[in-house]
Amino acid sequence: MGNDAYREMWERLNLDISAHDGLLEVLGKFYNDIYLTQQGRLSGMEYLDFVISEVHGLRIKELVEARNSGKKVVGTFCVFVPEELTLAADAIHVGLCAGAEIESREIENIVPRNTCALIKSFVGFTLRRLCPYTQSCDMIVGETTCDGKKKAYENLEDSLPMYVMEVPQKKDGADRSLWRSEIIRYKSALEKLTGNTITAERLKKSIKTVNDKRRALNRLNRLRAAIPTPISGRDVLLANQISFYDDPERFTKSINVLCDEIEKRIDRAEGIAPAGTARLMLSGCPMAVPNWKIPYVIEGSGAVVVGEESCIGTRNTRDLVDESGKTIEEMIDALCDRYLKIDCACFTPNTERTENILSMARNLDVDGVIHYALMFCQPYATEAIKIENMLKKEKIPMLRIETDYSMDDIEQIKTRVGAFVEMLSL
Ligand code: BJ8
């Protein structure tokens, strides 16, 4: 992943070069072990391998060049921030969620020790100057979803150009009005940042661009459900992860090429695992790059992941924005409605999520569900209880895992997942 040609660029972005070199080395090895050693991979995955190999290189160079030409870069931590508006302001939208454990005692100067790994990771990346995306942002959009995130944003205000959107906790009429006004406020913030007016024509185009990206990922999700499974869960997770960084139009094209190849594989009745392999669905917290621990363990235990009910998965792609709006007002309503369908565990009540998990489990014909919550994530760990009870009634086995980004518990998780898969195969 490292490349001397980019060193000057990283220096200009004020990265801690030696720590960053160390990070790239570890990631390169990790990627090789988890991804490149897989058997029967589709050639369409080469594009995604390339993007990952250049995730701190070529893509950052593109951001630097775009900024040099006057464009702005907006970073986000949550799928609630409407990418359509960012693109309509002619800015670049990138996800900043981080999935690697960063060691730094200073993290606890910003957030307490009992904070989830995702938050600690982005705090660590920021404090240690390890993320060229964060360093490239002109505005970073936080949101009032879980308490851990919103309080961390407050404490990062001195080091980052933060802007925080208020996401309601319920979905009644007053909540919709609040969310609609927040979308309008975000539109104004973008116009001020970029100096560009978001016109109806620009917004219509960007709604289509982002919908096309979701359509491509939904197509991939439909195809992966075939029996035998034509693509590994790890590879689909990677596609979802990269969707947060890559240029949206280029990404959509590459996913559709991958899907064309999968269709041919399905026609030949070929799979990456034989028919009869236990089919599992992952549900819960998002898995940001390079958090590949659980899918790696599952697929190493002789099962295959056929769906991710997560924000780096179907929760982010399932619902499209209505494209029929003509005026800005109509399009803002369409954005408002679509984003309020996100069934994040931060909402109360959140019955849609339970219903969506059940219909996904049935449609994918899964043998079991693995619910994944990051340690100290109250919203997802608490919802896991309700989901387990619901699945029990439906006779769908579920395994609950709470973990972080470290490898300390990997052997214990392997044992639990192995036993779960064995039980499903009896
Ligand atoms: S819409 S899931 S991306 S908030 S794991 S930081 S919830 S304590 S990530 Fe999320 Fe938006 Fe919801 Fe999706 Fe908090 Fe839990 Fe940590 Fe989490």
Image (cartoon, rainbow, N blue to C red):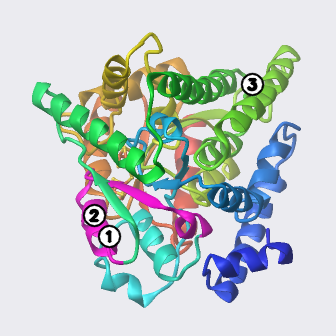
Location of residue 9 in the rendering, given as x and y in whole percent from the top left corner: 73, 74
Question: Which corner quadrant holds the N terminus?
Answer: bottom right
Q: Residues within 10 Å of mark 2 (few under 14, many from 20)?
A: many
Q: Which residue in the protein does label 3 denote?
A: 228
Which of label 3 and label 1 is nearer to you? 1
- Tag 1: residue type? Thr
For image coordinates 57% across by 65% down, the residue present is 136
Q: Which residues are magenta?
A: 132-158
Q: Which residue in the protein does label 2 denote?
A: 148
Q: Are the residues flagged by discs 2 and 1 in contact, CB closer than 8 Å?
A: yes
Location of residue 133 in the rendering, given as x and y in whole percent from the top left corner: 58, 63
Is 169 located above or below residue 372 in the figure? above
Q: Is mark 1 within 8 Å of ligand 1?
A: yes
For image coordinates 62% across by 76% down, the residue present is 13
Horizontal side of residue 166 vs 205, given as left or right? left
Decide whether residue 189 is among the magenta residues: no
**Residue pushed farthest top?**
324
Location of residue 291 in the rendering, given as x and y in whole percent from the top left corner: 58, 59
Location of residue 6 in the rendering, given as x and y in whole percent from the top left corner: 79, 73
Looking at the image, is mark 2 or mark 1 earlier in the sequence? 1
Q: Are the residues flagged by discs 3 and 1 in contact, CB closer than 8 Å?
A: no
Q: Is mark 2 within 8 Å of ligand 1?
A: yes
Look at the image and tell me whether residue 395 can be seen. Answer: no
Mark 2 falls on what kind of element?
helix
